[in-house]
């Protein structure tokens, strides 16, 4: 298993094509200048020991040297041992609302981005809990199954947007029903579902039924409200510029509001708590405290251990190539000169 520490240094590889272009332009300029100075056969007499091959070889050494130095800065690490570790934690599923109402900007930068930031901060506070992610609008979609890979969770989280589900609306009941299938360990003492939404539920009647079934399966449901109760229009943007506001069938501008009542009711029925997500720090601290109070279940997880730094090898090889480039002369070496490739010995 290979792990890259500082991927941002890969941008330095963009120097290489620039160097190659400069080298080619320089060679073209040299040839044109030499033609003005003297005929090609006279230039060969003036510099019989000059090697055309070595200038290309120097460029190759320089490119390889820079490439290996960049890899050294990235610092590849190799996991040398796969081991099974014992961990204690809670199974947590995040159901995130990706309906169009989450584009409202009554909370900066908008409700969906705020939701993603909240979930990301909660993940940062976790130690050994397993997490899963669900996206839902008019229907629910599994985004990430239960895992201990927090890096993958954040990657999937950032890719979520309001266009990922064609069916619009807000079916919280489907998110709850799908979340119930995530908890595959019957002995898990604590199963937690966080519903992150503005509370605009288009299936209120069946939602509480779904909550009741989830509680029977031992799932505690917490709700996190995102938005403002006074409401906000839904902007329609193109290339980041607002073109218009979403309107209903009568041509009236749609105002979407945070419905705390339904979220509080879901949390009460789900043996959980409702949290207002306006203040990220307060919401995350409250959730962290709630999770810490829960009983932890021991489970096994396989992971690579003993990652070893490999940067020294790449730096060493890179410096070697740069050393060769500096001390490689443009003149032909003795063995190359003996080959008499350009018939220099016959020229007088």
Image (cartoon, helix red, strand yellow):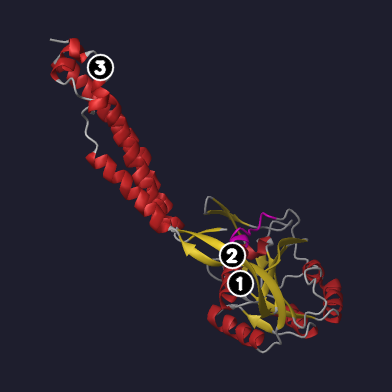
Is residue 158 within the magenta segment? yes
Question: Nearer the N terminus, badge 2 or badge 3?
Answer: 2
* Separation of residues labelled 3 and 1 (CA atoms): 71 Å
241 on left or right of 11: right
Quadrant of the image containing the N terminus: bottom right
- Residue at 65% across / 87% down in the picture? 290
- Residue at 27% across / 40% down in the picture? 325
Please name which of the two marks, 2 or 3, marks the residue nearer to the observer: 3
Quadrant of the image containing the C terminus: top left
Residue 68 image position (x, y, % from top left): 39, 48
Q: Secondary structure at mark 3?
A: loop
**Residue 31 in which image quadrant:** top left
CB under 8 Å between discs 2 and 1: no
For the residue carrying disc 2, how many other residues have a C-alpha within 10 Å: few (<14), some (14-19), or many (20+)?
A: few
Please name which of the two marks, 3 or 1, marks the residue nearer to the observer: 3
39 on left or right of 198: left
333 on left or right of 230: left
* Separation of residues labelled 2 and 1 (CA atoms): 31 Å
Looking at the picture, does residue 251 appear above or below residue 232?
above
Q: Which residue is mark 1?
A: 119
Please name which of the two marks, 2 or 1, marks the residue nearer to the observer: 2
Question: Nearer the N terminus, badge 2 or badge 1?
Answer: 2
Residue 265 image position (x, y, % from top left): 77, 82
Residue 233 image position (x, y, % from top left): 62, 64
Q: Which residue is mark 2?
A: 81
Q: Secondary structure at mark 1?
A: helix
Q: Which residue is mark 3?
A: 340
Residue 57's label in the rendered image is none
* Separation of residues labelled 2 and 3 (CA atoms): 56 Å
Q: Which residues are magenta?
A: 154-164
């Amino acid at each position: 298993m290979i792990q890259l520490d500082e991927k941002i240094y890969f941008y330095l590889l963009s120097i290489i094509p620039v160097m190659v272009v400069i080298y080619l332009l320089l060679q073209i300029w040299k040839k044109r200048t030499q033609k003005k100075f003297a005929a090609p056969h006279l230039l060969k007499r003036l510099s019989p020991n000059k090697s055309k091959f070595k200038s290309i070889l120097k460029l190759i050494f320089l490119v390889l040297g820079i490439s290996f130095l960049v890899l050294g800065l990235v610092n590849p690490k190799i996991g040398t041992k796969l081991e099974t570790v014992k961990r204690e934690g809670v199974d947590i599923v995040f159901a995130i609302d990706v309906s169009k109402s989450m584009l409202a900007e009554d909370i900066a930068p908008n409700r969906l981005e705020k939701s993603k930031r909240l979930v990301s901060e909660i993940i940062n506070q976790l130690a050994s809990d397993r997490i899963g992610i669900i996206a839902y609008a008019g229907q629910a979609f599994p985004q990430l199954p239960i895992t201990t890979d927090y890096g993958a969770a954040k990657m999937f989280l950032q890719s979520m947007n309001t266009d990922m589900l064609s069916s619009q609306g807000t079916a919280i009941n489907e998110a709850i029903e799908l979340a119930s299938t995530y908890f595959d360990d019957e002995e898990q003492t604590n199963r937690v579902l966080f519903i992150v939404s503005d509370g605009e539920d288009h299936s209120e009647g069946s939602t509480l039924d779904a909550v009741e079934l989830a509680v029977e399966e031992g799932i505690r449901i917490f709700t996190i409200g995102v938005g403002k109760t006074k409401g906000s229009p839904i902007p329609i943007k193109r290339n980041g510029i607002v073109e218009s506001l979403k309107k209903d069938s009568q041509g009236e501008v749609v105002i979407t509001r945070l419905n705390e009542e339904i979220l509080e009711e879901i949390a009460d029925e789900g043996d959980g708590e409702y949290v207002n997500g306006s203040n990220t720090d307060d919401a995350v601290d409250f959730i962290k405290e709630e999770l810490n109070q829960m009983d932890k279940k021991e489970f096994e997880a396989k992971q690579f251990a003993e990652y070893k730094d490999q940067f020294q090898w790449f730096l060493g090889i890179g410096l070697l190539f740069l050393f060769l480039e500096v001390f490689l002369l443009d003149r032909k070496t003795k063995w190359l000169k003996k080959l008499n490739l350009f018939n220099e010995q016959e020229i007088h």
